[in-house]
Each structure stands twice: as C-alpha cells, then as structure tokens.
Image: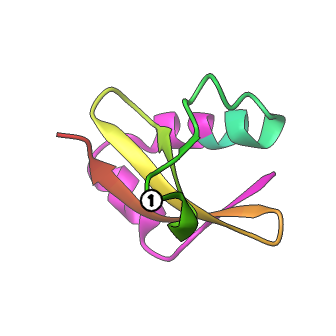
Amino acid sequence: MNVINKPGIVDYCEKRQILSQYLKACSYIELGFYETVKLKLLHPKEYGIYQFRITGKFRGLAIKEAGNLVVFEISDHQ
C-alpha cells in the first residue's frame, strides 16, 4: 500500500522535528508492517479513517483511496 501526503503534512512534521519518524512509519506501511505502526481503523468504521503511530505523542490520520493510504492530518495524541 502506497502512502500519499496531502499538502502541508511534511512541513508540519519538519516544524515539530518528527519528519524522520514520519518517513519511517510510512515506509513500514508501504512494506506491510502494519502492526509496527499500529495501523487501525477508527470508530465509526463507516467513515473509513485510519490511524497510525508516528511517535508516542503524534498520530497520523489517513483514508484509503484506490489502494493508497492518503495522509490528511497529523494530530497531537494528547
């Protein structure tokens, strides 16, 4: 599954100094190691929003489109 970034995602990660962790999480998803980043479907499931772990503090939110995971937000998990 390929990971596609919406505009502003990389800038957000650079400002918070988590770009390397974000890119590593994306590479794990592309390799199929979903358990490593704790990729899961959030409730309510009919919305189709996935969450994955970047660091202990940050999570990525994404939707699945045509076999790709489109990251639309990085959130502070607190």
Q: Residue furthest top?
A: 36
Neighbours of disc 1 within 10 Å: few (<14), some (14-19), many (20+): few
- Taking the image as shown, residue 47 lies to the left or right of residue 55, namely right
- Taking the image as shown, residue 68 lies to the left or right of residue 39, namely right
- Taking the image as shown, residue 20 lies to the left or right of residue 35, namely left
The verdict on residue 60 being magenta is no
Residue range in magenta is 1-25
Q: Nearer the viewer, residue 69 or 16?
A: 69
Q: Nearer the viewer, residue 24 or 45?
A: 45
Position in image of residue 11 (x %, y %): 39, 63
- What residue lies at 56% left-to-right and 30% top-to-bottom? 37
Determine which quarter of the picture holds residue 34.
top right
- What residue lies at 32% left-to-right and 26% top-to-bottom? 56
Q: Quadrant of the C terminus?
A: top left
Q: Which residue is disc 1 drawn over?
A: 44
Q: Secondary structure at mark 1?
A: loop
Q: Disc 1 marks which amino acid?
A: Pro
* Up/down of 47 relative to 31, above or below: below
Position in image of residue 20 (x %, y %): 50, 37
Q: Residue furthest bottom?
A: 7
Position in image of residue 73 (x %, y %): 40, 63
The verdict on residue 24 being magenta is yes
* Up/down of 2 relative to 48, above or below: above
